[in-house]
Image: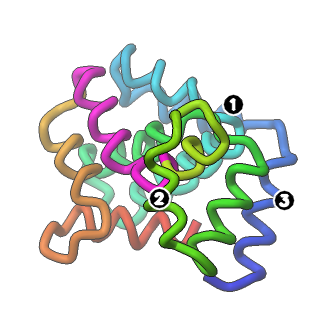
Amino acid sequence: MALSYRLKQFAQTFVAAVPRRQLHQAQKILTPNERQLLARLQPADQRHSLAVYAAAREAAPEDRVLWVAALLHDVGKGRPGRRDRVMLTLLETSAPWLLIRWRRHPPRSRRGRVARLVAHTEASAQLAELAGSSPDVVATIRAYGHRDHARGRLLAELDAKR
């Protein structure tokens, strides 16, 4: 990823406001349990999910499954702090093997939290499943970035641009 993208991403963590009108519109397509998952995200992650959702609506105007997956694709991140995000970015580019080792650390430790961020896509799919999301939504989140799954591939492409 380009440095300018990462700097913009980091700066977004300081913005507290979530566009309420966009959020309200997006919540209309979610079940009550899915709304709770979206509400758990930090404001920066909510704004990101709304941006991916808007892009999904534009790219696939009739694909409600993709829209819901766009809103929920990051719910498995939990509530990482800025330091956790910065450490993840630095380690992904300079020492990815440490992230594998850090999986052994307790989930509440800094190392455990950072390592857990790597596997947030599967955690997002599991949470969506527990929330009662449709099997297609769960499969789309789980297939994030898989080239042989059209929705999963598109979701990753839209996410990378936001």
Give the residue pinned by disc 2: 101
Residues shaded magenta: 116-132
The numbered disc on residue 147 is none
User: Of residues 125 and 17, which is closer to you in this image?
Assistant: 125
Q: Position of residue 135 (x, y in %)?
A: 13, 37
Q: Cα distance, mark 2 to mark 1?
A: 40 Å
Looking at the rendered image, the disc whose residue lies closer to the viewer, 2 or 1, is 2
Quadrant in which the N terminus is drawn: bottom right
Q: Cα distance, mark 2 to mark 3?
A: 29 Å
* Dot 1 and dot 3 residues touching (CB under 8 Å): no
Residue 38 sits above or below residue 31 on the image: below
Looking at the rendered image, the disc whose residue lies closer to the viewer, 2 or 3, is 2
Looking at the rendered image, the disc whose residue lies closer to the viewer, 1 or 3, is 3
* Label 1 secondary element: helix
Give the residue pinned by disc 3: 11
When asked about the image quadrant of residue 108, the answer is: top right
Q: Cα distance, mark 1 to mark 3?
A: 20 Å
* Label 2 secondary element: helix
Give the residue pinned by disc 1: 20
Q: What residue is shown at x 61% (from left), y 47% (from top)?
A: 111
113 displayed left or right of 123: right
The amino acid at mark 1 is Arg
The amino acid at mark 3 is Ala
User: Of residues 89 and 144, which is closer to you in this image?
Assistant: 89
First of labels 1, 3 by sequence position = 3
The amino acid at mark 2 is Arg
* Dot 2 and dot 3 residues touching (CB under 8 Å): no
